Structure formats: C-alpha cells, structure tokens
Amino acid sequence: MAEDLKKETTVNATRLWTVLARATNSVAKNLSIHIQTLGICDSDFAALEALLHKGPLAVNEIGSKVLLTSGSMTASIDRLEKKGFVERHNHPTDRRSNLVHLTSRGKSFIEDAFRDHEKVINDNISVLTQQDMDSIYPLLKKLGLSIESKLNE
C-alpha cells in the first residue's frame, strides 16, 4: 500500500476527486454496516444522533441537519417512535409543529450506539497519523467551504 502512495507525483483535480469519493464511500459503507447491526437504518441513526447532540428539534430541523427531506424524516421519526426511542411534543411557540424528544430508552440506546460508532470511525481513520489528520483537515474544510460558498451565490 505504501508503494502505491509513492507512485503518484502529480495529481489532477479529477484524480483527487476520484480518490476522495472512493475513500468517502468506503468509510460510509463501513459505518452503514455498523449501523445496520444496531437494528436501525442510517437515517434513523442520524436523527437519533442529531437529537442526542442538539436536543429536542422539530422534524424539519432534524431533516436539514441530516440532509433528508421532510417526508423521509417523518417516516424516520415514525419508526423511532414505534421503537419507543422518541416522542413528539407540542412546540411551545409554534402550534403548527411538534418537537421531537429522545425518550430515556432512546437516549440510552443512542449514547451506547454512538460510543461504538465513534470506535468504528476511529478504526477507519487509524491508518492516518495525527500529523496526517492535522494536515488534511484544513484542506478538506477549505474545499468544502469554497464549494458551499459558490452554491450559495
């Protein structure tokens, strides 16, 4: 593997995108496999994780955080409600919407699941040294922010 990394001298944008996309897909696939072992799907995990870290949210807020449509998010919340992981409560200031709250069962589930999920992430990334991560992080952030800025124009 180290020999493969040394062969390339000049990388163009297309080649970089291909490698970035493949790496992202590999990590995402591995994380998805882990989530499936929990007995839930990726979107349900993402919703629970958002609620764990952000607190109670409206369905559309969860959807915008996890990049899902309102319809997909509603279906996800319905599944999680049936499992006893979340509850809907009236929004205190907007009678048209509900806030989704973790139940104690849901909180316990996602805390344990997320702890294991972080281990899977760390295992995936462990091929990189701290210096590698410190080097690549600002570059990827720069790339993402630049593209996001162009999209918002």
Image (spheres, helix red, strand yellow):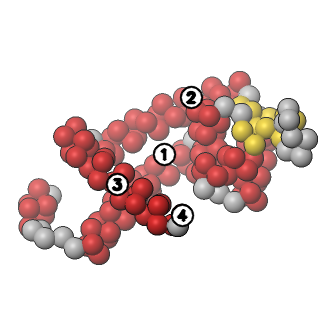
Given residues 141 and 30, the one toward you in this image is: 141
Q: CA distance from mark 3 to mark 2?
A: 31 Å
Q: Within the image, what quadrant is residue 39 found in?
A: top right
Q: Within the image, what quadrant is residue 111 found in?
A: top right
Q: Where in the figure is residue 134, as x and y percent of width and height? A: 25, 41
Q: Are marks 1 and 2 in contact (CB under 8 Å)?
A: no
- Residue of label 1: 34
Q: CA distance from mark 4 to mark 2?
A: 34 Å
Residue 136 in the figure: left or right of residue 43: left
Q: Earlier in the sequence, mark 4 or mark 3?
A: 3
Disc 3 crowd rating (10 Å Cα; few below 14, some 14-19, many 20+) is few
Q: Which numbered disc, 1 or 2, marks the residue closer to the eye?
A: 2
Q: Where in the figure is residue 48, as x and y percent of width and height? A: 64, 39
- Residue of label 4: 152
Residue 7 in the figure: left or right of residue 34: left
- Residue of label 2: 111
Q: Earlier in the sequence, mark 1 or mark 4?
A: 1
Q: Residue at x 46, y 49 (%)?
A: 31
